[in-house]
Image (cartoon, grey):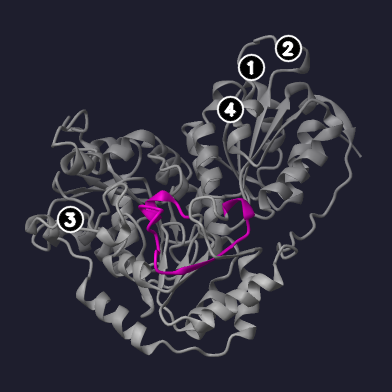
Amino acid sequence: MQMTGSQIVIECLKEQGVDTIFGYPGGAILNIYDELYRHQDEIKHVLVSHEQGAAHAADGYARATGKVGVCMATSGPGATNLVTGIATAYMDSVPVVAITCNVGLPLLGKDSFQEIDIAGITTPITKYSFIVKDVNALAPTIRRAFKIARSGRPGPVLIDIVKNATSDETDYVKEVPGLIPRMTDKIDELAVEEAIKTIRASKKPVIFTGGGVIIANASKELEEFVKRVDAPVTDTLMGKGAFRGDDNYYIGMLGMHGTKTANLSVSECDVLIVLGSRFSDRVTGNTETFAKNAKIIQIDVDDAEVNKNVSVDINITGDIKSVLEIFNSRLEQLYHKEWIDKVMARKDALPLTYNKEVLTGPYIIEKLYEVTQGDAIIATEVGQHQMWAAQYYKYLKPRTLITSGGLGTMGYGLGAAIGAKAAFPDKTVVNIAGDGCFRMNMNEIITASRSRLPVIEIIFNNQVLGMVRQWQTLFYGKRYSHTLLNDNIDYIKLSEAMGAKAYKISSKEEAEPVLREALESDVPVVIECIIQSDDKVFPMVAPGKNIDEAFDENDLKKGNN
């Protein structure tokens, strides 16, 4: 059947099961948008307020669903505005396909109006970047892009299409996408047997989970493995929800703002079983002393992550779900009562703490968990509020914390929340922000209002860039260089002007009624929470220090750090 390139784009998206696209039109991509108009009953398009919001929304959609998120933008600045969102997805292994259009082939390479080499720009931050110059290559490229985005370690792929390839015609034949097989061909049987032998011999094991467990849909297998090994579990920011946050075996997050229990237990353990984590510097602290008493077993789908940041004793490359299935089939029930008792006593003795006398970020997060009963998708921006959301909300299922881990993108959360809400309109979706982050992409409240996506935006307003100020307080002699935001913005009026309901919380007593009312709203809600400028995230590991040197406010008062 003869079709234009634009028709082929839409048909290929339908082949891949795409039901939602986030984007912003422009001249070079008009042919595709014109065709999309004819298919609006089959593919929903969410018009964002800025192209960066489109990339973040596609990312949030992908993280919440496990499917490929799709965003679209026109040439030039439209395409370059996607870059931060593409890089965010790349750092966190999120499957996104970004479709851009460029000037026509005769104008390519001549610095034409709104021409940019977006494929070249995004090469370092994508799994693959395509430029399609011939309509005959269009369908095979789109199909290949989706396969690449989903295969192995997922990630973003960019397709740039010259404008004439969207109007030229060629034959189109429908194809049904094949299943993406688990990556098992590299699983080394000798390494598996060595790992099992090491786990059996362990007296003080710890299981450390990252985002790879969620990507592999291996939470069920992880739960069985934990109980079989009889070991405490810690996680990364990206691994939240892979293992239930209310389980007795769970000891909290690891690393710079992890719990003292997790940091001390990993430093003391004799075997550390690492599942789908790349050993980020925010997790390890001083890599030379990380888990210094342990044999480290690393299981990851990407062999490029092995021995990159931390040297390991045993590595298994392959699909984590498959490896855990093997472990569970071969390991007998193990018991480590003495070790578990010690870790649990430590957990009781070293809880997370905060000031209970005034309104704080942790109090709001705990109250949010209470009123949602843990049944919500939580997105975050980046900073203190992100760490509080990681520490004080218990994630009971995978894909319920959506946050920028690797790139640390301020302005990410609201777009991502919109993407998650578009995917799951019946679920409660909340974005946790600081006042600094909210300013980055607050215009996406307009998107939520226009698209009737009732997300809840919680702003912790401390009138400073909180995390940067915390570092300035602790490590820069209280020299607050350009981190004060005391410019008296009225976030209530601003949010109402963008079509949202808006509330201000200034005391603990106001929190629960407002949160409960927000949960019942059928329009976007913005909740401004007034907290103190010098509230800090504790525990904390100073940069370059060992993770067992984590300190909190009491340690500072005692002069222990």
Mark 1 → mark 4, Cα distance in angstroms = 10 Å
Quarter of the rendering occupied by the N terminus = top right
Sequence-wise first label, 1 or 2? 2
Q: Specify whether residue 418 is painted magenta.
A: no
Kindly identify which numbered label has been placed on residue 365.
none
Mark 1–mark 2 distance (CA, rounded to whole Å): 9 Å
Q: Residues within 10 Å of mark 2 (few under 14, many from 20)?
A: some
**Residue highlighted by disc 3:** 360
Residue 171, placed above or below residue 245: above
Residue 34 relative to residue 483: left or right: right
- Magenta stretch contains residue 281: yes
For disc 4, the marked residue is 79
Check the image and report above or below for 148 versus 164: below
Q: Which residue is mark 2?
A: 107
Other residues around mark 4 within 10 Å, as few (<14) / some (14–19) / many (≥20): many
Which stretch is magenta?
279-305
Identify the image quadrant of residue 538. bottom left
Residue 539, picture quadrant: bottom left
Sequence-wise, which precedes: disc 3 or disc 2?
2
| Residue 90 spot, x, y in % from top left | 56, 43
Helix or strand or loop: what does disc 4 sit on?
Answer: helix
Identify residue type, mark 3: Thr
Distance from disc 4 to disc 2, alpha carbons, whole Å, reads: 17 Å
Could you give the CA–CA distance between mark 3 and mark 4, rounded to whole angstroms? 39 Å
Tag 1 residue: 115
Amino acid residing under circle 1: Glu
Using residue 318 as the reference point, say whether residue 363 is left or right of it.
left
